[in-house]
Structure formats: structure tokens, C-alpha cells
Amino acid sequence: MHDDSRSGTPAPAWQPLSPSRVHRLPCGTAFGATDVGLVRIGNEDNFLIDEALGLVMVADGMGGHDGGEIASAGALTAVLQFLQQALRDHGDLTAALAARSQNTLVAGAADPDATWTDDTVPAIGILYDAIEFANQTLCARNLLRQMADGTGMGTTLTGCWQPAGGGADNGPLIVFQVGDSRLYRLRGNEFVQLTRDQTLYQQAIDAGILDELPKRNVLLQAVGPYEHIKPVIEAHPVEAGDLFMLCSDGLYGSIAHAEMDSVLRGATVDTAAAVCQRLIDMAKADGGRDNITVVLVFAGRE
């Protein structure tokens, strides 16, 4: 387990990986924003939106001094670089996924119980490899710093990817998570959390423990501190008009579920910047004790 506590030591100048502007994706449109909050000295959050791949990710780093911001930026960059390299190796995404599918079929041929026939399996597989690459990259940095397993810099990693692109008619949204950054979906009148926090607190709640609960920020896993992790990767159907929100715990830890729901209703691409800022302002009104990051993805909307 990794205690997601931060040091008060000043961090070097932080750089966002993606600008806060409207990003046109194959599956729709995205806008993201991040804020240091009112207490932290540096911003260990980061987000990345890649228009060509249709990839959207949020990371919340930890590790003290510059470790947290190195971890969050490093994990996001490593996942992107792995997927981009797969495209370069095979010419385009379709060929890369076809190659991954062939590898899966060959590997599964020896297993008579293998049921890997869904079209999303190659995409899930290549994404799993990308997250593993990111973890090994950060883990190697921790080893260079002579950090023991389970210690050193690390980061949460939550994101969504629709490799087929083109909205609801061209494949599901692949949602992936390590740690406790979240992804929500607003569809019609239903606002739901699609991810589940990988924390000791959530584990206790799931077990029915209601007394003497552990701290909310103790992660069961993170990218970087551990040699082996098990990312959760799921495929969710997409409908035109869906609104997805990715965020760090600096947002949802300060704003109630119903309040987030209320702010997101009626949000449009044109008001995305104002909606993100409204959510950040609400978190800061609650004390702004952590870095705050929010990214909105409008499916099938221009």
C-alpha cells in the first residue's frame, strides 16, 4: 500500500502536458483544466489529451519534492509514447491492433478455454502493455534512487480511449485505472461513477467495515512504486451525447456527487471551460487542500 501524502517542499516549475483548450477527438471533443489548489506548493496532477489517438488521461502524482510531478507526467507520456510507437511499427492503428490480435490468437491457441473473441480485446491488450511499460519506466527510476518496492514516486492513472473513433457507432470506450483518480459518465438523467477507487478505504467499505475506517488516500496500487500492478481495464458502450468527466481526488474529495451532477447538466462544448472552472472554484471554496484536475469528454459532439 502507498500512502498518498505530499511533502511541503517547494517543487520546480510545473508544466502541463496538454493546454486548456478545446481538443477535437475522433469520438468527440475534450477540454481539461488543472489547478494547484490553495494549500499545495506545487501541482503534482497532470492530464494529457491526444487528438490523433482519441486518448484522454489524468494522473495524480505522489512522492514529495519533484517526485510527484515527475511521476504523473512520466506515466502519461510513457503510455502515449508506447501507443505511438505501436502505430509507427505497424503503419496505423488498425494494423497495430491487428498485429496485437494475431499475437493474442497465437498465445490463446494453446488454451482450449480461451474465449478472447471480442473485437475490443486487441485494444485492451495493447493498452495493458502500454500501462505496464509506464509502470516499468517509473519503477526503474525508483530503483535508480535505491527505493524499495512499494516506496518512491508514483502516480494514479485513469483514462479513456476509443481507438476506433467516430462516436457511438464505432466501438466502445475503453476505460482504464490504477489508483483512485475517477471517471464519471453523465447520460441523460443518470450520473454514475464508472471507476472504483483502489484504496484501503474503499476496500473496507466494500467489506462492510463502518468503524475505524482507514484514511481515504491510502492506495492499494499506483504506477511506479511496485514492480507489478494490475490495472483495471473495461469497455463501456458509448452513446451520442454522453458526457464523461475524469478527475483527481482534489475535485471529488471536495464536491458531493449531487453537486458535480448539477454543474455538469447542461454543459456544452462552448461552456466546457466555464464548467471546469466552476468545479475547480467549488473545490477551492471547500479549502482547496489538494491539486484539482478535471477533464470533460463530450462524445459525438462538435
Image (tube, rainbow, N blue to C red):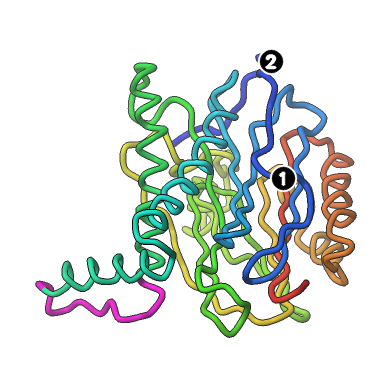
Q: Give the labeled residue for mark 2.
A: 10
- Lower position in the chain sequence, tag 2 or tag 1: 2
Furthest toward the left, the residue is 110
Tag 1: Cα neighbours inside 10 Å, few (<14), some, or many (≥20)?
many
Magenta segment, which residues?
A: 110-121
Q: In the rendered structure, which amino acid carries the disc numbered 2?
A: Pro
Q: Magenta includes 147?
A: no
Q: Specify the quadrant that holds the C terminus.
A: bottom right
Q: Position of residue 241 (x, y in %)?
A: 74, 78
Q: Which mark is residue 293?
A: 1
- From the viewer's side, name the closer residue of 71 and 90: 90
Left or right of residue 248: residue 135? left
Q: Quadrant of residue 264?
A: bottom right
Q: Magenta includes 116?
A: yes
Q: Position of residue 147 (x, y in %)?
A: 37, 20
- From the viewer's side, name the closer residue of 61 and 102: 102
> Residue at image x 55%, y 60%?
53
Q: Position of residue 273 (x, y in %)?
A: 85, 54
Left or right of residue 251: residue 79? left
Tag 2: Cα neighbours inside 10 Å, few (<14), some, or many (≥20)?
few
Please determine whether, in this image, residue 241 is positioned above or below residue 160. below
SS for tag 1?
strand
Q: In the rendered structure, which amino acid carries the disc numbered 1?
A: Thr
Main SS, magenta region, reads loop
